[in-house]
Image (cartoon, rainbow, N blue to C red):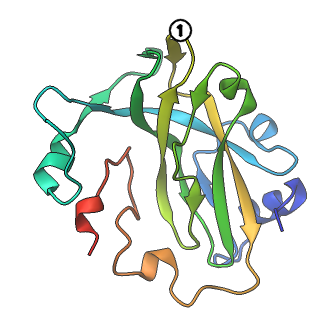
Amino acid sequence: MVLQDAELIKRLITENEEERIVLTPFIDPATQIGPASIDVCLGPHFKVPVTSHLPAIDPGNDNAVQSYMRSVDISFGESYYLHPGEFVLAATIEFVRVPYDLACRIEGRSSWGRLGLLVHATAGFVDPGFSGNLTFELLNAGKLPIKLTPGKRMAQLCFLHLDDKPLIPYDKRAASKYNNSLFAEGSRIYQDR
């Protein structure tokens, strides 16, 4: 079941820490809370592919994977221009914590989708127990550059109720590579067994 607005508000303000959805900062609840989702905003930190020094990405080579992206930080009020066919990583302004009895999906907003912007290439699922800023996988599938400005509502979070809590939530797993991330995170696939 997807949580609707009344349940989302209840989960955001509950005193019960086990049930509370943490989303901070919450810039404008009146516009961010929808009928069955919460909008999240674009932060100022980007990871941009640098390809001139790599013949290919070897997922098992940590040096190759880590050197594939470089960090670019822009100030609030500045913009980043994503050109057609370009791919970058960015992160939400908001720090998010998903309670153990919920899972979450990050979905693009239709207003951006109609401009050709994809906000997640494949990784739109957020496990129970995740804490951190969520990483956007931004791809411009349109024909013109898209101006990206930190603070703009970029995506929406849909929370799903679980029948039961997981045996091992994301924050308790030894293999949780992205928990407590505060910025856009590049791939850590080289840590896979």
Q: Residue at x 38, y 56 (%)?
A: 181
Residue at 65 percent across and 56 percent down: it is 105
Which one is in front, 28 or 174?
174
Tell me what residue is drawn at x 56 percent, y 91 percent.
167
For the N terminus, the image quarter is bottom right
Q: Position of residue 6 (x, y in %)?
A: 89, 58
Q: Amino acid at mark 1?
A: Leu
Residue 100's place in the image compared with 12, above or below, is: below
Q: How many numbered dots are placed on residues in this image?
A: 1
Q: Is residue 49 visible?
A: yes
* Left or right placement of residue 2 versus residue 66 in this view: right
Mark 1 crowdedness (10 Å alpha carbons): few <14, some 14-19, many ≥20: some
**Element class at badge 1:** loop
Q: Can you say which quadrant of the picture contains the C terminus?
A: bottom left
* Residue at mark 1: 144
Q: State left or right for residue 25 relative to residue 90.
A: right
Q: Residue at x 37, y 45 (%)?
A: 183
Residue nearest the viewer, comparing 52 with 48 = 52
Indicate the quadrant where residue 101 lies: bottom right
- Expressed as whole percent of the image width and height from the top left, the position of residue 3 reads 82, 62
